[in-house]
Amino acid sequence: MTATAFVGGTVLTMDERRPAASVLVVRDGRIAAVGDVGLERDHPDAELVEVDGRLVVPGFVDAHQHLSLTALHPRWADLRDAVDLDTVRTRLADSARREPDAPWIRGCGWDQFATGLHLDRHDLDAMGFHRPVLIGCFTYHRAVVSSAGLDALGITAATEDPPGGRIERDATGRPTGELTERAWTRAHVASLAGYDDPDRWGDLVVAEARRLLTEGITAVHDAACTPAAEAVYRDLARSARLPIGVLAMPHGAILDGPVPERLDHGPPTGEGDEALRVGAVKLFADGGIDLAIDAHLGEVHVEVGWLMPDLVEGMVHALRRGFDVAVHAMGNAGLRATLDAWETARRAVPHADACRLRLEHATLAGPTELARLVDLGATAVIQPGFVHLVGRNIGDLRFDDATFLPYADLLASGIALAAGSDGPCYVTDPLLTSRQGVTRLTEEGAAVGIDQAVPMREWLRLYTAGAADAGRQTAERGRLRPGLRADLVVLSGGTGRVDASALDGADALTVEQTWVAGARVHRRGPVP
């Protein structure tokens, strides 16, 4: 048997039974004991790890991420900082040379909001590629394709917009190449051909998971996990190659499409083990670019975006198969539609009392929606990094009856909360995003609803115990409680030691070490 005792620091357990301790003992990959100074003497065979005033917390669980998608990014042209067409063409050409057998050339990370780079099919056509080209927006809710891409998709001036999607058109009615929501996700599926070979995809998942360990992330909830991605995860789990725990949230091949075919095949929510477990099925209430808003600004009634047409059908199907349900709901109208659909679906499937509802994002909500969330016992999975992503576009806009990123209101209401990054739509680093949730400042320093700030101590809880609870993983991870898996992180402050004020304010914290199942898998700093 192997044992390790962490001494000389503060152990923040996230366990309601004992929130803090001075000593943590790990044995054979599980938490063996937590307690006061001297506890280590009860375990004389344990190797001592002196953390020297640092903080020991559970390993971070990113409750909303897209690991399987992010893993494919190295195969595509990285356009995150591309500001001109020459850069786009050069990087696409490099990607095309690296991937000569892929039917499509793909770029990712395009951010016209930050770079000002607007694209249409004519821009891509002029680059002279013989294969169809797709450039995906960083949001994964929009893309631009070349004329050859439109042809490959069968999109013409006569093609109607799909329900829940839009084909952008010029003044003459011809498609511009820009595809939004469900129009883009069909292009996404078609353009994956040649990039989704399972062996290489699996290797890329392993590489990205190892990078996440350097940020203290020891488990993720892969929100919208396609059947192909789920198969990759299962192969990795069978061969014990998954570096981190994965909760696969099943979805169809069309990322924001209707009822997933996966519901009729394979295990339901909760099946699996600590390496790979099945989570809630993922559905969509509104868009990510076209979020559904119904709110008031003085005498102005603001109604924008649209609702997806098949939410109730998807919920009923999921509940009958024994799945929890997680719904992308960004706007307050999307949130209301989700709550209405849940009540309707529960009436249609009365035996579904054990199934749970997760709200992914809850970006805009008011008192009415918060009260209903409490009444229905739902969990909200929120992203502190949206302070930057949403804030740079809406500024400090305040509706009369709804609040953007209402994190303090959600916390005060008593709603069960979890935190996630939404990577690759934004950076995955839990400490960086949490600081934005503390300061309510964008990367440019603009304030976004300062009154909705939440202390760092709470973000650490939402990235650990809160996230584990949201994924029905309370009995395996998220707390430093005897019997649970020994995934943990050692954090330092600006001077190494962590002052208690750092957990209430915005002082910087740094991941020094990451441990998975009692084994150290990442070491940055001077802690032995």
Image (spheres, rainbow, N blue to C red):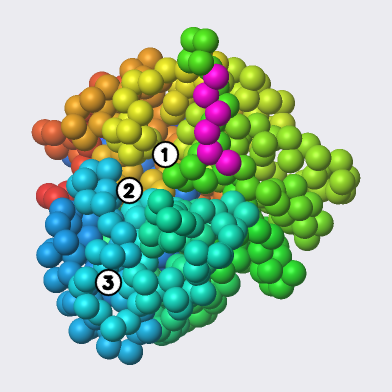
Give the magenta part as a residue range.
301-306
Element carrying mark 3: helix
- What residue would you read off at disc 2? 426
Q: Quadrant of residue 265?
A: bottom right
- What residue would you read off at disc 3? 125
Residue at the image point whose x is 68% and y is 25% from the top: 372
Mark 3 or 1: in front is 3
Residue at the image point whose x is 61% and y is 23% from the top: 370
Q: Is 128 displayed left or right of 41 in the figure?
A: left
**Amino acid under label 1?**
Gln
Residue at the image point whose x is 33% and y is 39% from the top: 389
Residue 145 in view, yes or no: yes
- What residue would you read off at disc 1? 383
Which residue is more in the foreground, 426 or 258? 258
Q: Is 72 displayed left or right of 284 in the figure?
A: left
Element carrying mark 1: loop
**Amino acid under label 2?**
Tyr
Q: Is residue 296 above or below residue 487?
A: above
Q: Is residue 506 magenta?
A: no
Ranked by sequence position, the earlier of labels 2 and 3 is 3
Q: Is residue 57 above or below residue 108?
A: above
In three-dimensional space, the C-alpha distance between marks 2 and 3, rounded to whole angstroms, equals: 29 Å
For the residues bearing labels 3 and 1, Cβ distance under 8 angstroms: no
For the residues bearing labels 2 and 3, Cβ distance under 8 angstroms: no
Q: Main secondary structure of the magenta part?
A: strand
For the residues bearing labels 1 and 2, Cβ distance under 8 angstroms: yes
In three-dimensional space, the C-alpha distance between marks 3 and 1, rounded to whole angstroms, equals: 37 Å
Q: Is residue 9 above or below residue 285?
A: above
